[in-house]
Image (cartoon, rainbow, N blue to C red):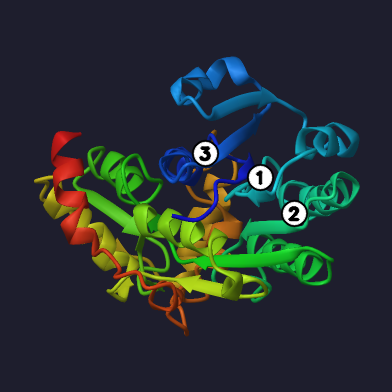
Amino acid sequence: MSQPLHLVVLGGTGFVGRHLVPRLHAAGHRIDVLSRNRERHRELGVLPRVRVRSVDVYDAAALADALCGADAAINLIGILNERGRDGSGFRRAHVDLTRTLLDACARAGVTRLLQMSALRAGEGSSHYLRTRGEAEALVRASATAWTLFRPSVIFGPGDGLYFRFAALLRLAPLLPLARATARFAPVYVGDVVEAMQRSLASAASIGAVYELGGPQRMSLAEIVRDTARWCGLYRAVLPLPDALGRLQAALMDFVPGKPFSSDNFRSLQLDSVPEEDGLAALGIVPTPAAAVMPALLARR
């Protein structure tokens, strides 16, 4: 077992964070989870070496104070949609926050950084991918000993992939689907957090970019059809031509919660499939969705 570290996690209350924090705790590390409202996430505080702290992570001085004495920072913060449509929400969550974090790390003397990004970061026309790429550029140019993680879509308990489609499929017998042929390599959240945990203990991970994908390359339509089958539902998937897909996305820009958006549509124009096997580089055998999701969806 590697030497226990003092870690500060941004975004530790999100989907990946809720799996990463217990994994890091099990490895013996001491973790501070920074949250806008610690009272909403008291369940993490039951772990004896985990502390949830209310900190405005966009405040450089407050963030530097929270980082004092830490061995490493882990940035999991990211959004898939913004309130508006001009990219400012993505820029704030991805670029501005990363810049603030790097400044705070320099002030606090924290030299190790693990940064979550995304496959195809910096490519295409979506605000999401463009700002992920800009954040990566800031990290690469910094003085920190950084490691970047670029996952495809992530699945697991309560995910925003299979569970979201399961909810949509229950609404109607037919699901019109934009960019149905877009391809992914769905990666298990347990494998993602294991990759992050192993990178902390490996000097070889410093300056490395790990593309994380599962063992299967699947189209979006195949993912949806698997979801229906595992839920025991008989549903038809209607692939939309791009003209109708763009229209569907434009209309959903104004639906509360944005289940789909124009920026999502632009992201889907690029396949999310890794060119390099980052899990294999870390000695991790990827978990197929079929080994995890049928039981989870059946319980739901």
Q: Amino acid at mark 2?
A: Gly
Q: Quadrant of residue 295?
A: top left
Residue 1 seen: yes
Please tell me which residue lies in front, 52 or 154: 52
Q: Where residue 100 sits in the image (x, y, percent)?
A: 84, 48
Q: Which label's residue is closer to the chain start, 2 or 3?
A: 3
User: Quick one: SS at disc 1?
Assistant: loop
Q: Which label is found at residue 14?
A: 3
Q: Is residue 120 visible?
A: no
Mark 1, Cα crowd under 10 Å, few <14 / some 14-19 / many 20+, is many
**Residue pointed to by mark 1:** 82
Query: In this orientation, which residue lies closer to the viewer: 196 or 3?
Result: 3
* Mark 2–mark 3 distance (CA, rounded to whole Å): 21 Å
Q: Using the image as rendered, state which of residue 262 and residue 89 is in the foreground.
A: 89
| Occupied quadrant, residue 51 | top right
Q: Nearer the viewer, mark 2 or mark 3?
A: 3
Q: How many marks?
A: 3
Alpha-carbon neighbours of circle 3 within 10 Å: few (<14), some, or many (≥20)?
Answer: few
Residue on which the image places disc 2: 87
Is 117 above or below relative to 31?
below
Residue sitting nearer the eye, 212 or 169: 212
Residue 121 to residue 83: above or below: below
Name the front one of labels 1 and 3.
Answer: 3
**Residue 72 left/right relative to 60:** left
Q: Amino acid at mark 1?
A: Glu
Label 2: which secondary element: loop
